[in-house]
Image (tube, grey):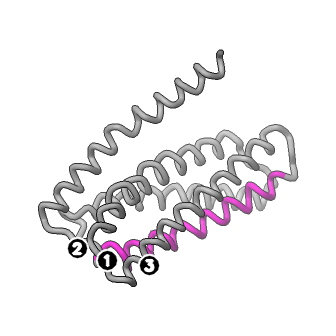
């Protein structure tokens, strides 16, 4: 399945997300033992989650794979699983937002925010492995059967184009935000 299937690049992205979850697990253990976190590490982790895991990875799933699946008249169980995955993505965005807020307050000197940083981290650390397993063990393979070889090849090309434009979009928005702030 991972050769010339759109599931292949998505699964490779899962491996990188799992590596970040391992880093976050170590940081959570450090928080538990030292009652301290590095706000810069948290900011970097949040940028990774928002840009790589959500915008890049979930973006390909939602904007390309899931959108095309909705055109295929999915089996009701698979359609239900796809909606659960979409709901999972929304949930992860909410928890990441909570982590951003708590980390900002912690960086500004609020020691009580550390508990919220830890709680959000724990939630993400528990969430991602289960979400990845759901996609890889139950969703990707049956949904690929809905696409012809040429449709899968087109999806791979669309994934590449998505990746090519992502970094430009991210930094264009950063510049626009800074321009607005300077006015």
Quadrant including the C terminus = top right
Magenta residues (range)? 113-141
Taking 127 as reference, is 178 above or below it? above
Check residue 109 for magenta coloring: no
Q: Which mark is residue 74?
A: 1
| Furthest residue toward left | 150
At a point 47% along the width and 57% down the height, the residue shown is 17
Q: Which mark is residue 80?
A: 3
Structural crowding at the residue carrying mark 1, measured as other residues with C-alpha within 10 Å and reported as few (<14), some (14–19) or many (≥20):
some
Check residue 120 for magenta coloring: yes
- Decide which of tag 1 and tag 2 comes sooner along the chain: 1
Q: Position of residue 70 (x, y in %)?
A: 33, 68
Q: CA distance from mark 1 to mark 2?
A: 8 Å
Quadrant including the N terminus = bottom left
Closer to viewer: mark 1 or mark 2: 1
Q: CA distance from mark 2 to mark 3?
A: 16 Å
Q: In screen coordinates, is 4 left or right of 55? A: left
The residue indicated by pointer 2 is 146
Determine if residue 84 is in view.
yes
At a point 87% along the width and 48% down the height, the residue shown is 111
């Amino acid at each position: 399945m991972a050769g010339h299937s759109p599931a292949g690049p998505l699964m490779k992205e899962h491996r990188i997300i799992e590596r970040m979850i391992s880093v976050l697990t170590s940081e959570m253990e450090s928080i538990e033992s030292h009652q301290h976190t590095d706000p810069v590490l948290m900011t970097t982790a949040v940028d990774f989650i928002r840009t790589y895991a959500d915008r890049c990875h979930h973006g390909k799933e939602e904007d390309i794979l899931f959108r095309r699946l909705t055109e295929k008249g999915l089996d009701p169980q698979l359609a239900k699983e796809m909606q659960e995955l979409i709901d999972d993505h929304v949930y992860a965005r909410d928890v990441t937002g909570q982590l951003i807020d708590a980390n900002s307050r912690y960086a500004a000197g609020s020691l009580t925010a550390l508990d919220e940083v830890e709680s959000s981290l724990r939630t993400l650390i528990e969430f991602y492995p289960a979400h990845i397993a759901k996609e890889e063990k139950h969703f990707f393979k049956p949904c690929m059967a809905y696409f012809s070889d040429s449709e899968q090849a087109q999806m791979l090309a669309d994934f590449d184009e998505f990746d090519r434009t992502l970094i430009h979009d991210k930094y264009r928005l950063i510049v626009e935000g800074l321009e607005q702030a300077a006015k």
